[in-house]
Image: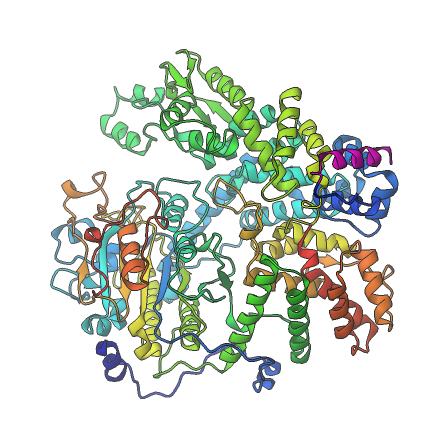
Amino acid sequence: MRFLAALFICTALAAPAARAQRPLTPHDSALHALNRLAYGPRPGDVDRVAALGVMSWIDAQLHPDRIPDPEVERRESAFPILDEDPASLARAIATVRQQRIAARRDGSDSGMPPAWRQRVPVDSQAARRVRQTMGQLQQLAVMRAVRSQRQLQEVMVDFWTNHFNVFFGKGADRAFTPSYIERTIRPHALGRFQDLLLATAKSPAMLFYLDNWQSVAPGAEPPALARMARIDDARREQMLARMPQGLNENYARELMELHTLGVDGGYTQQDVIAVARILTGWSIERPQQDGGCRFNDWAHDDGEKTVRGVRFPAGHGMDEGVRLLKLLAQDPATMHHVSRQLCARFVSDVPPDGCVDAAVGAWSRSDGDIAAVLRAIFQSPEFWSDQAVRAKVKTPLEFMVSAVRATGGDPDTTPRLAQVIGRLGEPLYAQPSPAGYPESQEDWVNSGALLLRMNMAVALAAGRLPGVTIGFDSLVPATGDANALIETVDVRLLGGILTTHSDDVLRREVGDVRDPVAARALVVGLALGGPEFQRQ
Amino acid sequence: MGGVMAISRRVFVKSGGLALFSLGLDPLFLARAAFLPYRPLPSPTAPDQPVFVCLFMRGAVDGLNVIVPHGDPFYYRERPRIAVPAADVVDLDGHFGLHPALAALKPLWDNKSLAAVHAVGSPDSTRSHFDAQDYMETGTPGAKATPDGWLNRYCQHDAEHANTPFRAVAFGPELPRILAGSAPSLAIDDLQAFGLRVPQPGARDKLTRAFEALYQGAETGLLAASGRESFEAVQRLQQANPLQYQPDHGAEYPRGRIGHALLQIAQLIKSDVGLRVAFLDATGWDTHVNQGSSEGQLAARLQELGGSLAAFATDLGERMRSVVVLTMSEFGRTVRENGNSGTDHGHATAMLALGGPVRGGRVLGKWPTLDPAARFEGRDLAVTTDFRDLFGEILARHLGATDLHPVFPGYAVRPEQYPGVIRT
């Protein structure tokens, strides 16, 4: 309560005199915090957070390592993907590729009708393992989002997964993405931005996705090839033709445009080229052997470079890149760009300057400590303002996970719930664009998407959504009393969000449903698929 | 456009009865064939509004075995095992010919409603499927961070046509990159399943009414507007009655995903629900191994493609006068066959344009020849038509787009660079 009192004072001070801010009740502020720092409340969560004090709860969420999470740890054992290493996964993928080529060859010799030849099913242990990778990885994220006590940690993992997006479907990233999420993103989700940036820059998943692994100084060739010059000229020519030639600017450009400075962050095409030259040689080990980051001296551009007026003297190899990344991590443009994106996620699609400034201030004081930046956002008056509360539309992931949480639901370990989220438009790790999934409502709200959400809500409420067990039987007793039913659903499952209009519609629709169990499913389905629950 | 009309009578009216389609008929759904709309709808959009259908052949189709340059001496020299023998080629103009599996399209060529554009592609040299598809769908080759697709950007800036829920529809489980963006677009897997899905028809109507009421009264803004659109779309589609659909003029769509998607597109066009751009994709063109020649892997895919396109034209009949179908693919394949009797990733490919507005009966685009000296990087068919000029021409001359700058940012689409695929 002490925190809340302080909060009221600061919101009152910050609000313009003309527009008095109605202070949020402990219940409302708990619901707001659960909607933004978590994937919505599970039954009972709002009361618990309100009783604890919302700022105390937020404080705890900022230190996920101190929150016990035995439920999730237990469930994680059902995800073998957590024990896979990229090299063995890459070997399995290579095996399947060989099997497919062999099967296709056999198929064409066997006199089967041509139409059967195009799709060659390969059914082997390796094929099953590869097929299951994506589903397991997606479902693991969904399971954690639904069940974890460390909700803010899961929200931030999703945020950074989008910020530093890679695409599972691009070649070797089928093998690299699982460890990218587990070992590159997750450990740094609430750590220092600079560490996270460096980790992504060195990750094989990013090096492959944005092509830096094949960016080489123009004219450079590997020592092995140079040695061959004396032996076999024709073969050397052949190998050279298959070699990456010259600079690839992809990573250099996205590093500045998306990961750090932002598109208006003040850099030129000359800077992009200089950054690409600095990062030449940042490559990967062969995926099937190790798949780690490796620096190729031979591929590195040894000349002097200048990026945005900063001189990088010649001859410092990989250290040049490390120095560059550290500079980018603490550049004011980066602080502003990333803070703004955090505020777009937590406050509103077009975030007010106040919370962005607060985040930037905390960033520079804490040397980019993400937890400190988040704390500043959550303490800013803008986060608690009328304009922010319930102002954001849920993304498909947020919608589906919050609906399962609201119904006290429990996803199983099959990829089915993750596939539903994919169907709603946000298949995890399957966004080809390096910009990741968008944050604003215009990108998610349209007629087809809404119909799908309604369908999923109705199926979930009726216990028909595959891969999920719902758990509100004891919370919302089936009853013939429509008024009592609607109120219980609203209070116990939704945190009291229904408008009087929706209340009226529900009462009218449920009035003639005789079966109390069907009536309950109808009310829950309409409420979850209705407009109020699309917001957070 | 009497041509297309004539063809539908002369060539495609077959003696066999109407084909019966296995649409997974649901008896409950049939029982409610007498569905009555629960509110009046505004009058349907005017017929004969232009429609653009994009068919993406994912996997990089071997354009040289689709529109075969049988008159180019290097063709047979470079492809001893997979070239289509001259005797099998369906000759078009003495130099080019159709793959025999596309013979069903020949009447449309003769009728001047089918054209091919050869040596078309991307100015970017990537041979990665992923990157090249991305560039072809964003319309910004070389720029990876473009958030939206060019078809969506066209819709964002399309002031010429009414914005209906069915303006832009992709057939498939997910919205493709080409339609990603802020303009509303639908991804429809199956028209029959569009709308609220509950087992009992009575419950469905009740649920539809209830959700409509919830979204109508609750608030204003994007959610409310989209909610309204959703229910208008549902109702328009219910009136079109997907289960009752029978193709016209005896058209028989081959079994398979291409035919099924084109059938549904034909249905939407005839329903006058305001369809402007439709998208479908077809896979199975990445023929590295045992590609085949007149018969084989590629032939089987082309058979399905050609049969489906021909059925679509037959089914639509006169309506084809306002429809343009364009096939596209991320790049072409190597001129020379590889050691596995297949072809590897190349550069330029061939695209087909079909429909009444098409200046058909010719292979368009400058032919760079297969002479090794004229090849891209010494091995692949060179690009002589930037795909943006082809796409841009269709947007401008068929759909009537007046400003292509926002659709293809950073590129000046100029009429003098158009391949000339649309009649003027």
Rendering coords of residue A502 (x, y %) = 73, 65
**Is residue A78 visible to the viewer in this orientation of the structure?**
no
- Does A6 appear in magenta? yes
Q: Nearer the viewer, residue B304 or A378?
A: A378
Vertical placement of A504 versus A50: above or below?
below
Give the left or right position of residue A197, taking residue A209 as reference: right
Q: Report the residue that reaches farthest toward the front.
A: A18
Vertical placement of B220 versus A92: above or below?
below
Q: How is the image coloured?
A: rainbow
Rendering coords of residue B398 (x, y %) = 29, 64
Q: Which residues are magenta?
A: A1-17
x 16%, y 52%: residue: B367
The quarter holding residue A445 reads bottom right
Q: Nearer the viewer, residue A464 or A29?
A: A29
Q: Nearer the viewer, residue B135 or A137?
A: B135
Give the left or right position of residue A378, taking residue B250 as reference: right
**Is residue A309 visible to the viewer in this orientation of the structure?**
yes
- Does A493 appear in magenta? no
Rendering coords of residue B309 (x, y %) = 33, 70
Dominant secondary structure of the residues highlighted in magenta in the image:
helix
